[in-house]
Amino acid sequence: MDNHITTPSILVQRAMLIMLSVVLAFILGMFAVRVVQASDPYVKTVLSLNGDSVQGHAIFQINCAGCHGLEAAGRVGPSLQGVSKHKSRYGLIHQVISGDTPPMPKFQPSTQEMADLLSYLETL
C-alpha cells in the first residue's frame, strides 16, 4: 500500500476540480432543458405568434377567473399578479397545458389562444 500523504495544495486542486465539474454539469443540464423546451412544436409555435392581451384577458375570464379571480389577484387559485416576472414564458405555457399542479385542470388552448393568454399574463 502506498503511504502517500496528500498535501493541502493537492486537496485544493481536487476541490476546485470537483466544483468546476459540478458547475459544468449544471450548465450542461440547463442547456439540455432549453433544447428540449425549444424543440416542442406547440411551444415553438406559441412563442412565434404575436399574442393579443385583450383576447388573452377574455380567455382568462372564461377559463381561469373562477379560481384566480377576475383580476387574477387570487381566490381558490393563487394570485397571478407579476407571474411573468418569476416564471419563464415556457414555464407559463407548461403550467397552463400540463395539469401537473392539481387542482388546476389540464387546459389545451389553440396556439393562438395560448399566445393571447401569455400576452395577457405578461401584463399582470
Image (tube, rainbow, N blue to C red):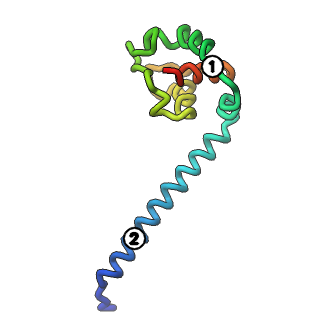
Position of residue 45 measured from the top left corner of the image (x, y, whole percent): 70, 30
Q: Relative to 5, does residue 104 appear above or below in the rendering?
A: above
Q: How many marks?
A: 2
Q: Is 115 in front, or is 103?
A: 115
Residue at numbered disc 1: 116
Residue at 45% x, 66% y is 20
Q: Residues within 10 Å of mark 1 (few under 14, many from 20)?
A: many
- On the picture, is 32 further left or further right than 77? right
Q: Residue at x 39, y 15 (%)?
A: 74
First reached walking from the N terminus: tag 2 or tag 1: 2
Q: Which residue is mark 2?
A: 16
Looking at the picture, how far across and down is residue 88, in whole percent?
A: 52, 35
* Amino acid carrying mark 2 in the image: Met
Disc 2: CA contacts within 10 A as few (<14), some (14-19) or many (>=20): few
Determine the secondary structure under disc 1.
helix
Q: CA distance from mark 2 to mark 1?
A: 47 Å
Amino acid type assigned to the residue bearing label 1 in the image: Asp
Q: Quadrant of the N terminus?
A: bottom left
Disc 2 vs disc 1: Cβ atoms closer than 8 Å? Answer: no
Element type where label 2 sits in the image: helix
Tell me if residue 8 comes above or below residue 18 in the rendering: below
The x, y position of residue 78, in whole percent, is 39, 20
